[in-house]
Amino acid sequence: MAPKDIESLLPQLLSFPPHPPPPLPLSDTVYDKEIRILRKALNDTPANALTGGVPNGGDLLDILDPSINTLPYLYVLFAHINASRQKASIVGGPLWFKALDFFERFDPVQVRYVGTEFRRLVVHVRDAALASNQHDTSAGYITDQSELSAAITYRDPLQYFIYGAMIYMALKEWHRAIPFLEAVLTAPSRNHASRIQVEAYKKWVLVNLLAHGHVPGSLPKTTTSQVAKEVRTLGKAYEALGVIFRDVLSKEVDARRLDAEVHAGNQKWSEDHNMSLVLHVLDAYRQFTIIKLGLTYAALPLPIVTQRTSSNPDDHTETAQYISMMINSSRLNATLDQRTQDPQSWVLRFALSPSTGPRARSEQESYEELVKQTARNAKLAEHVRETDRKLTLSKDYINWLKQSKKDTLSTATEVEEASTLPGQHPFDDEDIMGDG
C-alpha cells in the first residue's frame, strides 16, 4: 500500500532520484523500477494529501526541487492548480510562477514517465494565459489575440538579419555586420531577389569597403544565381563606387575621382538611405591610405603623411589629431613621435609587427583571450556533438544508413562471386598441405 499521509510519503518523495548522485549512476533497470514505484505511490495518494501542509509548517512545493524531484513536483503542482481552479485564474499568482519555474527546470527523463500529466499541465497553463485579460508577466501578452505575435513570413528572418546588421553599422562594427548581410543574400528565394536582398547587397558593398578596403570578387557561394544577377544589376552604382575606391587606393586613378563619384551619386545614396555609409567610405579611404604607408615605410615625417592623405596639405595639426584617433581606436598600430611643439618635426613610426606597438597585448591580455577562445571552442564542440546526435536520429540519416549497408553487402557479394572460379564452391579451398 502506498502511504496516504504526507508525513509518511515525504521521505519517499525525496529519496528518488538520490541526491547528491551516487558515485556509480543507477542502472537503467534500477532507475526504471524505482521511478515506477514512485509514480504509483503518487497516483495512489489523495490530492488533499498533496496540497496539505508538511510537518513543521510550509508546503511541499517549497521543499521539492523541480529539477531533481520532477515527478512529485508535477503532481503536487497540479493538485494545487485543481484545488484553486474554482476560485480564480492562476495567471499572475504564486502557482503561475511555480509553473513557469517548473517548465524551465524539469528533468526531461523523469517527464517521459508522466507524459499525460505533463501535457495536461501544459494545456492548462496555456488556456489560463489565453483566458486571462490581466497578465502580470510579459510572456502572457504574446498571444494571437494581443496581435503582438503572428505567423512567421518569408520577410521576417530577412528583416531580423538586416536590422541586426544595421545595429552593428551604427556601432561601426563593420566586420560583425557582414555575416548578417550575407545571411540575407543567401536566403532561399523562389524566382527573384526580394527588395530586402537588394538593400542588403548595397549595404554589403559599402560595409566591405569599410571593413576590408575592397569588395569581394563574388557573392557568398550559397547565393542563388538569379538573386546574384538581380542584386548586382540593381546595385551597379555601388559596384562602380567599389571599383573606383579600389583603383584610387592602388593609385591607378586620381583620388579626386572618388570624390566626384560620391557627389555624382548623392541623390541615389540619399534615396537608398545609405548616405551616411558612403560618407564613411570617403573617410575609410584616408584611413586605408595611412595604413598602407606602413607597408612600405617604417617611419615618415608628419608633413609627408599630411601631403599624401589630407585634403589640406598644410594642416599638420589636423593630420596629427586624425592619426591619434586611429591609434586610440586600434585602427593603426603606430606611434606619433612628438618631441617638440612643432607638428612639422613630428614623426609617425609604424609598428614592425602585431606583437609590438600600441596594439601589442600583455601576457595577461593574451591569457584572457586564450581562455575565451578555449571556452568558445568547447562550446562549438558541444554544438557539433549535439548536431551529430540529432543527425543520427533523423529519418533521412537512418534511410541513408540502411541503403549504405545494402550497398556494402551487395558489393561484398559481387567481389566474392568474382573471386570464385566457375564450378568451385566459395568455401571449397584447396588443401595445399594434402598429399593428393
Image: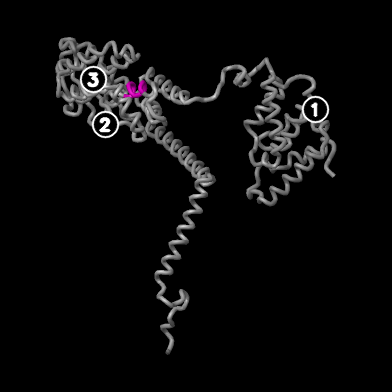
In which quadrant of the rendered image does the N terminus lie? top right
Q: Tell me the magenta residue range.
A: 198-204
In which quadrant of the rendered image does the C terminus lie? bottom left
Q: CA distance from mark 3 to mark 2?
A: 19 Å
Magenta: main secondary structure equals: helix
Residue 193 included in the magenta stretch of the image: no
Q: Amino acid at mark 1?
A: Gly
Q: Is residue 400 above or below residue 167?
A: below
N-term mark: 3 or 2: 2
Q: Amino acid at mark 2?
A: Gly
Can residue 31 be seen from the camera position used here? yes
In the image, which disc is placed on residue 57? 1
Query: What colouring method underlies this structural image?
Result: one colour
Classify mark 3: helix, strand or loop: helix
Is residue 412 found left or right of 122 in the rendered image? left
Sort mark 2 into few (<14), some (14-19) or many (20+) by Cα contacts within 10 Å: few
Residue that badge 3 annotates: 285
Q: x, y (%) of residue 301? A: 15, 19
Q: Is residue 431 above or below residue 9?
A: below
Which numbered mark, 1 or 3, is in the foreground of this view?
Answer: 3
Sort mark 1 into few (<14), some (14-19) or many (20+) by Cα contacts within 10 Å: few
Q: Are marks 1 and 3 in contact (CB under 8 Å)?
A: no
